[in-house]
Amino acid sequence: MIEVNDIYKSFGDTPILKGISTVLEKGKTNLIIGQSGSGKTVFLKCLLGLYAPDKGNISLDGKIYSELSPREQRNLRQDMGMVFQGSALFDSMTVEGNVKFPLEMFTDQSPSEMQDRVDFVLNRVNLIDAHKKYPSEISGGMQKRVAIARAIVMNPKYLFCDEPNSGLDPRTAIIIDNLIQEITKEYDITTVINTHDMNSVMEIGEKIVFLKHGIKEWEGTKDEIFKTNNEAVTNFVYSSELFKKVRQMYIEERD
Amino acid sequence: MNYLASIGSYAIMIKEVFRKPTKWRIMKSLLFKEIDELIYGSLGILVFISFFIGGVVAIQTALNITSELIPKNLVGFATRQSIILEFAPTFCSIIMAGKVGSYITSSIGTMRVTEQIDALEVMGVNALNYLVFPKIIALLLYPFVIAISMYVGILGGWVAAVFGGFSTSADFTEGIQLDFIPFHVTYAFIKTLVFAFILATIPSYHGFYMKGGALEVGKAATTSFVWTSVVIIILNYILTQLLLG
């Protein structure tokens, strides 16, 4: 579980986050949504410890990141997995090399133990025949799977995903969303996803935090987002005609 | 003020490069990869250029000896001095700033643009040590390349002088051995080691701290070439004054 307590972050004179508090729950997919420029990425980087908040603190299962020593921070980092928007796979390594990298860096496992673990996680994300291929030789959806495999290979307690299905076709995007949700349940990890894909919100949003201009405007579940009367949320989530109709149908069905 | 800030962040970068080393098992393979790309991969072009520049130095020296009073062995002497003192260590380093420097900036810059450096940092890896340290160590072999460049440059001078009919082999060889000061070779290698450090770190700095997209990677590579060359030229002057002045 991640507790965010009243964090502020500015760059120069520009305030980006203005007092955000929330709880991101274990075993659930927690979605951070909001328009471009709402502070989602800065918020995610604060959670990852890449940016230190100017004020307030972030507690990861009771450990306040800013109060840890550099060594403890590094150890805590090994409990975090991250899936980047562009996958961020190392071009010079094969799929297998990318997934094996954290194991080689941070464990003393034998080569056969590492290989077993790599095979296991690649199978888990349904990548069977891509071990020896380079990132440039596989599709965007496969690259995302490799990124997820690399993120979970160390058995993380926290999984962070920045726009995990951007650039993917709708079907592949749903497959990636479902994969992340399955992994979250299976390993009981705290998953935080930055997205502005409304399909993801409707599909896997067990907890949704809506940011607007660096402030937490609203939070709730995917069921509550149908019922909310918060104008900022409805303007953002139901900006397309399709989603307006979906919401209308939901309300009519409920009534 | 911007220049001062850049010098400050360059110094901080150098400090970070030597902090929290990467596991030896991984560093070993990175080292061999960098030696292959930075040293072995540069041998061909440096040998080619050294051979022909040595030849041109010999021909131009010979063509400028118009007085009968000047001994013919001056062609070999001038070729040796030009190659050992300046061409091999300094001119080759400028060429390397273009070849190796651009490669380093663009490869690290692309990693920055595609969030690969962020991925390393999120994992808790010291990205500067992982990316820059093996380049510094690999370039410690740079003096060997320069030794080869010296040999090939003088050989090129001999070929041009003898087969071009500008000097006899005996005169040229006598010139090569004339008034030889071993410290000149030491001076050249000291310069080379300093330039090797510059070749590894300034392009890395421009790649690592770049902001923007693909276009900025290209701009960063150009800026890195300019600054690496400028620093090499300035340090060449300072080192020459300190060591030979």
Image (cartoon, coloured by chain):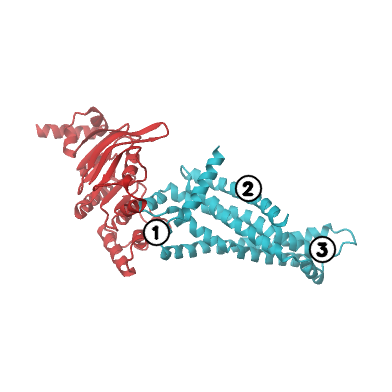
Chain colours: A red, B cyan
Q: What residue is disc 2 on?
A: B230
Which image quadrant for residue B175? bottom right
> Residue A45 location, x and y as percent?
34, 43
Of the numbered discs in the image, which one, if any, rests on residue B53? none
Q: Measured along the vertical axis of the image, is residue A78 above or below residue A19?
A: below
Residue at image x 46%, y 62%?
Answer: B30
* Residue B219 visible at all: no
Residue beneath disc 1: A134
In terms of secondary structure, where does tag 2 sit? helix
Q: Amino acid at mark 1?
A: Tyr
| SS at mark 3 in the image | helix
Percent x, y for residue B17?
47, 54
Which residue occupies 64% across, 60% down?
B190
Pinpoint the chain carrying mark 2.
Answer: B
Sequence order check, earlier mark of 2 and 3 = 3
Q: How many marks?
A: 3
**Marks 1 and 3: same chain?**
no
Give x and y (percent) for residue A54: 35, 37
Distance CA(mark 1)–CA(mark 3): 57 Å
Q: Amino acid at mark 3?
A: Leu
Q: Quadrant of residue B144?
A: bottom right
As drawn, the label of residue B74 is 3
Whether tag 2 and tag 3 are in contact, CB under 8 A, the answer is no
Q: CA distance from mark 2 to mark 3?
A: 32 Å
> Which chain is disc 1 placed on?
A
> Where's the C terminus of chain B, which quadrant?
bottom right
User: Residue A52, located in which quarter of the rendered image?
Assistant: top left
* Category of crowding for the residue at label 3, using alpha-carbon neighbours closer than 10 angstroms: few (below 14), some (14–19), many (at least 20): many
